[in-house]
Amino acid sequence: MKYFIALFSLLFLLQCDSTESPTTAAVIESRSLEQIQLKKAEVVKQLNTLEDELQLLNSAINQVDKKQKFLLVSAIELQTEDYQHYVSFQANLTTDQNVVIYPELPAILNQFHVKEGEQVSQGQLLASLSDSGLQDQLEQMQLQLALAKTTFERQKRLWDQKIGSEIQYLQAQTQYKSLQKSVAQMEDQVAKTQLTAPFDGVIDHLIADAGSTLAPGMTPVLRIVNLDRMRVSAEVPEIHLPNIQKKSPTKVFIPLLNQTYAATVQSVGNFINPNNRSFRLEIELENPKGELKPNMTAEINVNDYRNPTAILVDSKNILEDQKGATYVYKLVPYENQENVFTATKTYVEIGKSTNTQTEILSGLNPKDQIIEEGLRLVQDQQLVKIIQS
């Protein structure tokens, strides 16, 4: 208010001293628009001149007055640090060892040898199916094989002694080898009536009922899962492909459990889905306690950038001008006055941001001091004092 009173007082004195220009009141009374506009332009010119003179006077006061009151600000000294940037994606948990077992032969389910929730080992018998006489056929073929083997061995001994015809020897050999293959095929068919565990796991669900008729490849019998090793899968926009590599550090957050797991990227897809322009990303997680379940939702944070000597600034300390350029106020020591600095408007190039911090690519150096508190009150080249660092 004092500033404006002084300004108008000076303007009034100038008007009083002027003998060539009519007074403002006289111009207004003339009711001439042209005269009023000319008078306004004259007054604006005088105000601009006075403001320039006041600025020069304030600058002179700053240099001469050692007891003036400075704007108090807080500052921070910049340091380099290891900066790692992460990008987040939604994902789902799956397991490769999640299998529904179907029969390979038409049969009747005789009985289960396990219960739901039971831990089983690879190769363990899970269920028995009716063999429809396959076992009897196998035993008959085994008897035929034994006879064919004896016949062949005798023919071979005679042939080795140059006794008998070659055709008899070859017929015995062919019969023996043919029955060997037939027995092997029948043994494979009989084995299919015994459903065994394809891997170590847990019986998740007994689907069929004992005594029910099973169609090969169509009637599910049971589900077995292994949750020791889980897979986290996500569809990632293709723009991130150049920055994500195999073994990139990753954090996997499971909202349902409110837990975060440290891991690395296991595989990066080489195919871009044309429908959503994304690629597949997979991460493996150990699950010794079995807490992780298939189809759980997850949030993955993948490290896509690292700068071991980055300069980081709180994002709130970075301002933006009308043209979109970013700047901070750097403190430059003022002459030889202790704890007195010049607030210098310094334009900076910014990089990536994480939470509340932004990377500075250029414009600042380590050990530089920038203003924190008082940032919105300071002007370029204004003298300030630091109250806290």
Image: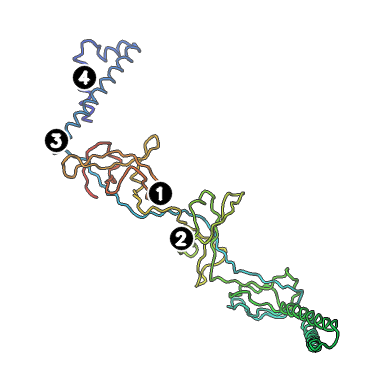
Local packing at callout 3 (Cα closer than 10 Å; few below 14, some 14-19, many 20+) is few
Would you name the residue on which mark 3 appears?
Answer: 65
Note whether 31 is above or below 121 in the view shown.
above
Nearest to N terminus: mark 1 or mark 3: 3
Relative to the observer, which residue lies in front, 334 or 75? 334
Mark 3: secondary structure: loop
Question: Decide: marks 3, 4 in contact (CB < 8 A)?
Answer: no
Note whether 250 is above or below 314 in the view shown.
below
How far apart are the alpha carbons under marks 2 and 3? 58 Å
Nearest to N terminus: mark 2 or mark 3: 3
Would you name the residue on which mark 4 appears?
Answer: 12
The amino acid pointed to by label 3 is: Asp
Local packing at callout 4 (Cα closer than 10 Å; few below 14, some 14-19, many 20+) is some
User: Measured from the top left, where is residue 115 in percent x and y?
Assistant: 62, 79
Q: Nearer the viewer, mark 4 or mark 2?
A: 2
Question: Decide: marks 2, 1 in contact (CB < 8 A)?
Answer: no
Would you name the residue on which mark 2 appears?
Answer: 251
Relative to the observer, which residue lies in front, 329 or 360? 360
How far apart are the alpha carbons under marks 3 and 4? 29 Å
Would you name the residue on which mark 1 appears?
Answer: 353
Q: Residue 185's quadrant in the figure?
A: bottom right
The residue positioned 29% from the left and 12% from the top of the image is 27
Local packing at callout 2 (Cα closer than 10 Å; few below 14, some 14-19, many 20+) is some
Local packing at callout 1 (Cα closer than 10 Å; few below 14, some 14-19, many 20+) is some
